[in-house]
Image (cartoon, rainbow, N blue to C red):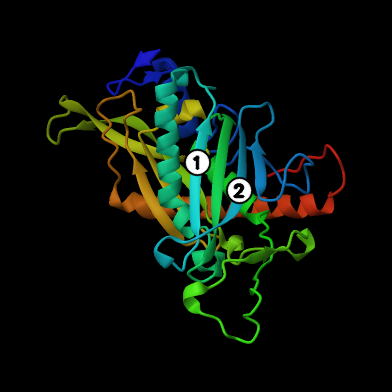
Amino acid sequence: KQQLDSGTAMSISPSEISFIRQSCAADYRIDGRSNLQHRPYMLLSPSSSPILSNGSSRLFLPGSTTDILCSIKAELVHPPFRSTDGAIDLNVDILPYMPNLTDRKDIRNKEMEVSSMLTHLLLPHLLDRNVLVVLEGRFVWRLNIDIMVVHCDGNLIDACSIAVRGAMQNLRLPFVVAVQKVGEENGNRDPKRASDEIMVDGDIANSIIPDGVVNCPIIITVCLIPLTTVAVSQDEGNNSSRFAKKKQENVMIVDPSKQEEECASTKIIMSIDTLGNICGVQKYGSSSVLNANVSGNIDFGMLSQIQAVAVSSSASAFAMIKKNHLDADTSAGKSNEYNNF
């Protein structure tokens, strides 16, 4: 294993890095995909898996290379300071599946990193928090999103966002009404002695789908794979004088594997909704790059290309998610049937 300046262990050798970069340059990655092609994820919902409940999902890859569970629990709470918005909390748990994450401290740091990125890029755009208000100033829904990463072969942030979207689309909130106390029927109700009694309808047939979940964004990560080419130039008037100049080029890939992530110079992480609007952007530095001369700086002209690649990839991902839900609804009631993501 190579040891980086940041202290992080690299699990692949320099020759493997060179081979992966050359395969990306040829638009033929080591698993047979093109640079802008996703892996065949499978997204399970309660209608396609009897072990999942409402507000949960499971994202995995055949062969157990990626397996992520997401569950959303809703609870009625009193809003702080009489706020008129609901609350959304997120927690990430990672099992020690990677060799360099066997130490609990490293796992905790990774959990905090993933949780922070999802909180920044995803949570503000999940849905309008006003729809979580039950009684203004008195009762609101608080959504607790729990993500458990059983195993992941790269592209962890994107995979978690897809699992969250799948769980949000399966979320059902019970119908809630306020109950008046005896003596308040005639409208003689003192606001200072307002009743905190509510009635929750436990019938799933009367449950409510929160408005805006269909526009829940996902995250697309575009990795820049550096390719150093050597251009040999010749001085004018002196045919014998030749010099070599190194030129840095980058190849863009999506849905990187764990090995491909270690070969990337920079990662651009974007949250994109169903309309193709970019909700948030974050640049991940080049601390995982073996070559120290790669700075990870992005050319301004490449930003538009990165945006176009991310939006196009998100459109493909949304189409596959939609197809998955349609297939799941069609096959509801059939056991042991999996649908392509």
Task: Quadrant for residue 60, please give it.
Answer: top right
Instruction: Count residues near mark 2 (Cα–Cα under 10 Å), then give few for <14, some for 14-19, many for 20+.
Output: many
Identify the image quadrant of residue 231.
top left
Q: What residue occupies the far front of the structure in this picture?
A: 183
Q: Report the amino acid beneath label 2.
A: Ile
Q: Which residue is mark 2?
A: 72
In the picture as drawn, the residue positioned furthest to the left comes out as 237
Q: CA distance from mark 2 to mark 1?
A: 10 Å
User: Residue pushed farthest top?
Assistant: 1
> Which residue is rendered at x = 66% and y = 40% of the image?
58
Please name whichever residue, 230 or 307, is drawn nearer the observer in this view of the structure: 307
For this rendering, which residue is in front, 42 or 97?
Answer: 97
SS class, disc 2: strand
Pinpoint residue 21: horizontal percent, then vertical percent: 44, 28
Q: Residue 272, relative to residue 164: is it above or below?
A: below
Residue 128 in view: no
x and y, in percent, of residue 166 in the image: 64, 50
Q: Who's the residue at 76% across and 55% down the image?
A: 326
Horizontally, is 227 left or right of 172 in the view?
Answer: left
Question: Where 144 falls versus 294 (above or below)?
Answer: below
Q: Of the two numbered discs 2 and 1 on the same chain, state the one appearing first in sequence.
A: 2
| The C terminus lies in quadrant | top right
The answer to which of 279 and 93 lies nearer the viewer is 93
| Amino acid marked by disc 1 | Asn
Q: Position of residue 181 (x, y in %)?
A: 64, 73
Where the N terminus falls, by quadrant? Answer: top left
Q: Residue at x 86, y 40 (%)?
A: 335
| Residue 51 seen in render | yes
**Which numbered dot is residue 91?**
1
